[in-house]
Image (tube, helix red, strand yellow):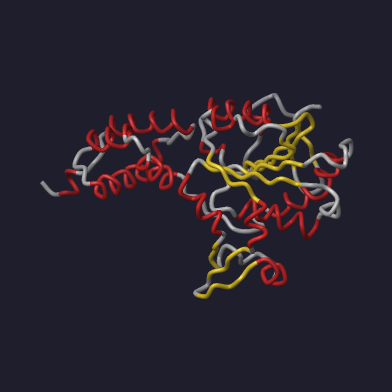
Amino acid sequence: MSEAAELALTDADFAKFRDFFYRKTGIYFEDSKRYFVDKRILDRMRATGHDSFRSYYMFMRFQASGEEFQKLVSLMTVNETYFFREEYQFRCLVGPVLDEVCRHRRPDEVVRIWSIPCSSGEEPYSIAIYLLEYWPRIDEVDVEILASDIDANVLERCRQGIYSKRSVQNLPREILEKYFTPLGQGQYQICEDLRACVDFRQANLNNPAETRFYRGIDVIFCRNLLIYFSDESRRQAADVFYDALNPGGFIFLGHSESMSRISPLFRVRRFPDAIVYQKPK
């Protein structure tokens, strides 16, 4: 029998992995994702020298370091992103959203913004750049930018802040030249000051021990994550965000996502540039 025939997942194998991954991450793979999932598991089976799913599954699940599971998370949650993606939301942030957040606050209170999942860092760094360039009050209000992702491996890339030409292609030339250093071979590194102003941490929305750190948040960006969750996981995520936000805090979702279909905890706010969801005051 050929290796291709031997290395294959049965329906039961797929179901077992899907249930395990869902319990760990909240991400649920529909049957339509079967080829995507199978291919990545089989690649890891070959890379780790396992000739059966059962052997690989036991190795991955009970490995003390958790390294193999993290590699699977990286493979299963690949997100393509770039700077200033869905820029209209950043315009809304530095306009009516932060105006409302700061309206009844003391000057010494810190504004806290949380980006989840931060993927390779383009979103939180975009937030930082947009605040510096376009928010009139940036010199008088302290801002803390928190960024988290379930993938521990991608966080090191965030901290290095090295990006391809494609990642920065939507940035105005003056911003690219102001905040990035060309490294050659089409790569750019974001400046050290911006790398230092974002706090990157690993966080799994399905793990209360990792999300408990996020409290007193004023604005959350959670774009294009909940579409991968089951209905139950979406509701649980909404509860996490509700607990994390200050009263009156806001959450931005992806353009195809709607908090109204997930949870009754938030009210819809329609601003000129974007629809945003707000925790009642």
Q: Residue visible at 43% across and 47% down?
A: 74
Q: Pinpoint residue 114: horizontal percent, then vertical percent.
A: 66, 42
Q: In this view, does 171 lie to the left or right of 97?
A: left
The residue closer to the viewer here, 68 or 239, is 68
Question: Residue at the location (65% across, 26% down)?
Answer: 263
Q: In this view, does 53 lie to the left or right of 92?
A: left
Location of residue 15 in the rendering, given as x and y in whole percent from the top left corner: 34, 30
Dividing the picture into quarters, in which one does residue 84 lie?
A: bottom right
If the image is split into quadrants, where does the C terminus sit? top right
Of residues 168 and 201, which is closer to you in this image?
A: 201
Q: Is residue 267 above or below residue 178?
A: above
- Above or below: residue 216 compared with residue 125: above
Asked which quadrant contains residue 65, the reply is top left
The residue drawn where x is 61% and y is 67% is 169
Outermost residue to the bottom: 184
Where does residue 132 sit, x and y in percent of width and height? 77, 58
Q: Horizontally, is 188 left or right of 68 in the view?
A: right
Q: Where is residue 49 in the image (x, y as percent from the top left)?
A: 21, 46
